[in-house]
């Protein structure tokens, strides 16, 4: 897919609509033989091969394959219906293209939103965990300090009594 405007994954219209446009690429035009470039001469082929260009690179590009519905419609002569003002087939194709583009855009938007939400939540969770860790560490340190102070006060209070017992 093209990368216009730095957006990846969003197709441009010509990538979505790979069908002949009515009035521009008609079955009659496709039936006419096109002038294809002839194969390069041997001298040109030698120059191209020395330059690293393969024979496949010199061949004309293939036509995109049309969507089944339009191709079938054109082959069965349903174009007269469009000429007669019946645009229901065109509307069906247009609706199909709209739905395809909409689905692709929604899929891209879903993926982008999921990534952005995940990044934002990750930042918030890391901050919350950091604050919680700091609070728990402070509470544990205060509890340990109180316990050690109580044990030391008790040990100091017992020390004179233990000395008097040992003198006797």
Image (spheres, rainbow, N blue to C red):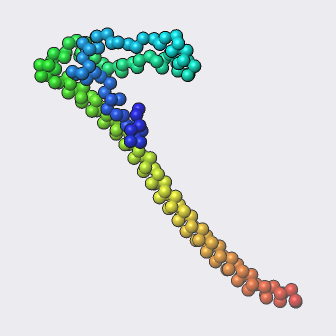
Whole-percent x, y for residue 48 in the image: 53, 18
In the shown orientation, is residue 114 left or right of residue 145?
left
Note whether 166 is above or below 74 in the view shown: below
Question: How many numbered tags mark residues here?
Answer: 0
In the shown orientation, is residue 59 left or right of residue 95?
right
Q: Nearer the viewer, residue 80 or 23?
A: 23
Q: Quadrant of residue 88?
A: top left
Q: Nearer the viewer, residue 149 or 89?
A: 89
Whole-percent x, y for residue 148 in the image: 68, 76
Please identify the residue farthest to the left as the structure is shown: 84
Q: Nearer the viewer, residue 157 or 166?
A: 157
Please identify the residue farthest to the right as the structure is shown: 168
Residue depicted at x 79% and y 88%: 160
Note whether 164 is above or below 142 in the view shown: below
Residue depicted at x 29% and y 14%: 30
In the shown orientation, is residue 6 left or right of residue 156?
left
Note whether 93 is above or below 121 in the view shown: above
Quarter of the image for the N terminus: give it: top left
Residue 115 in sight in this render: yes
Quarter of the image for the C terminus: give it: bottom right
Whole-percent x, y for residue 123 in the image: 49, 56
Q: Nearer the viewer, residue 111 or 33?
A: 33
Whole-percent x, y for residue 27 in the image: 25, 14
Residue depicted at x 40% and y 20%: 61
Residue 111 in sight in this render: no
Residue depicted at x 45% and y 54%: 120
């Amino acid at each position: 897919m093209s990368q216009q405007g730095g957006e990846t994954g969003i197709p441009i219209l010509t990538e979505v609509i790979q069908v002949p446009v009515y009035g521009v690429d008609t079955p009659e035009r496709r039936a006419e033989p096109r002038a294809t470039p002839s194969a390069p001469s041997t001298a040109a082929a030698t120059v191209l091969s020395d330059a690293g260009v393969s024979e496949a690179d010199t061949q004309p590009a293939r036509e995109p394959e049309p969507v089944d519905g339009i191709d079938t419609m054109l082959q069965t002569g349903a174009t007269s219906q469009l000429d007669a003002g019946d645009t229901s087939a065109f509307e069906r194709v247009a609706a199909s293209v709209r739905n395809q583009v909409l689905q692709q855009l929604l899929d891209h938007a879903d993926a982008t939103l999921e990534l952005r939400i995940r990044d934002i939540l990750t930042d918030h969770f890391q901050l919350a965990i950091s604050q919680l860790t700091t609070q728990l560490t402070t509470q544990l340190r205060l509890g340990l300090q109180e316990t050690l102070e109580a044990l030391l006060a008790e040990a100091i209070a017992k020390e004179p009594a233990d000395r008097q017992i040992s003198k006797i």
